[in-house]
Image (cartoon, rainbow, N blue to C red):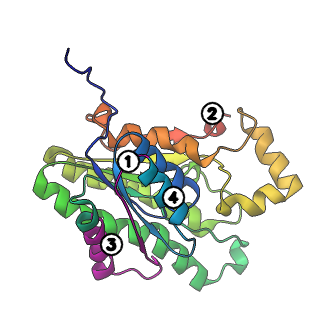
Amino acid sequence: MSKTFNPFDLTGRKALVTGGATGIGEGIALGLAAAGADVALTYRSHAPDDTIARIEGMGRKAAAVRADFTGMDETAAQEVVGFAADALGGLDILVNNAGIIHRAEATDFAFDDWRRVLSVNLDSVWLLSQAAGRRMVAQGAGKIVIVASVLSSQGGLFVPAYASSKHAVLGLTKALCNEWASKGVNVNAIAPGYTATDNTEALRKDPDRSQALLARIPAGRFAEPSEMAGAAVFLASDAASYCHGSVVTVDGGWLAR
């Protein structure tokens, strides 16, 4: 009896997840591995040993490289992509997840902080997508998933650089889709809502702000990082073969309120 086709099966695929040792990135890395992919990840300060062990415990290849995306240039991006391809024996999937946030009133927002956020959240996404895209276009296939945000559609409070960067990556998603869809490369995005990660720790510890956020979320809670994995697996799989320039929102109903 022939095996039933599973469009979400990632067996044999090779994936790179930036910021894959913690938070949403770790949730996505583990989700891709559970679906069958070998996974390389980048990390900045948090040791990736546990994540690597969990991926290998599923019978997948795993690798990690330390990378600081602040001020990333073309050479550094090519080295990160090359590391993943060499470690895994190819590259089929790139998940641009690494990101930072800085909170301050706009009148007091330092330009150095603005540039730092844009460097990590936008510049590195462009450089890594370009480096991976060259390989994927050459091989005639590939999946690029960009982690955007509900603040890709909103302004938020006290996060002008973050909101600007997340608006910009949606524009980048659509621009790359227009060039690469005909070449077999799918470029799509995920827009997470408020998730229990380091980036939202200050909000979650502020009783008034936390209560205000939860009151607006129809699901009544913050997301767990692992809850972003399903959207990533979908967009990285054959199930999304005709998805180009799409945004999958995973926000507990935040934008619907």
What residue did someone put label 1 on?
Answer: 59
Q: In the rendered image, which quarter is residue 176 located in?
A: bottom left
Compute the Cα span from label 2 to label 4: 34 Å
x%, y% of residue 45? 56, 76
Q: Nearer the viewer, mark 1 or mark 4?
A: 1
First in sequence, mark 3 or 4: give its number: 4
Instruction: Give the secondary structure at mark 3.
Output: helix
Is the N terminus in the top left, top right, bottom left or bottom right quadrant?
top left
Question: What stretch of residues is rendered in magenta?
Answer: 58-84
First in sequence, mark 1 or 4: give its number: 4
Compute the Cα span from label 1 to label 4: 13 Å
Residue at the far top: name it: 1
Is the C terminus in the top left, top right, bottom left or bottom right quadrant?
top right
x%, y% of residue 231? 46, 39
Compute the Cα span from label 3 to label 4: 18 Å
The reply to whether the magenta stretch includes residue 67 is: yes
Instruction: Give the secondary structure at mark 4.
Output: helix
What residue did someone put label 3 on?
Answer: 80
Compute the Cα span from label 2 to label 1: 39 Å
Q: Nearer the viewer, residue 39 or 127?
A: 39
- Residue at 71 percent across and 32 percent down: it is 218
What residue did someone put label 2 on?
Answer: 256
Q: Are marks 3 and 2 in contact (CB under 8 Å)?
A: no
Q: Are marks 3 and 4 in contact (CB under 8 Å)?
A: no
Relative to 14, 198 lies left or right: right
Relative to 182, 21 lies left or right: right
Tell me the amino acid under the disc marked 2: Ala
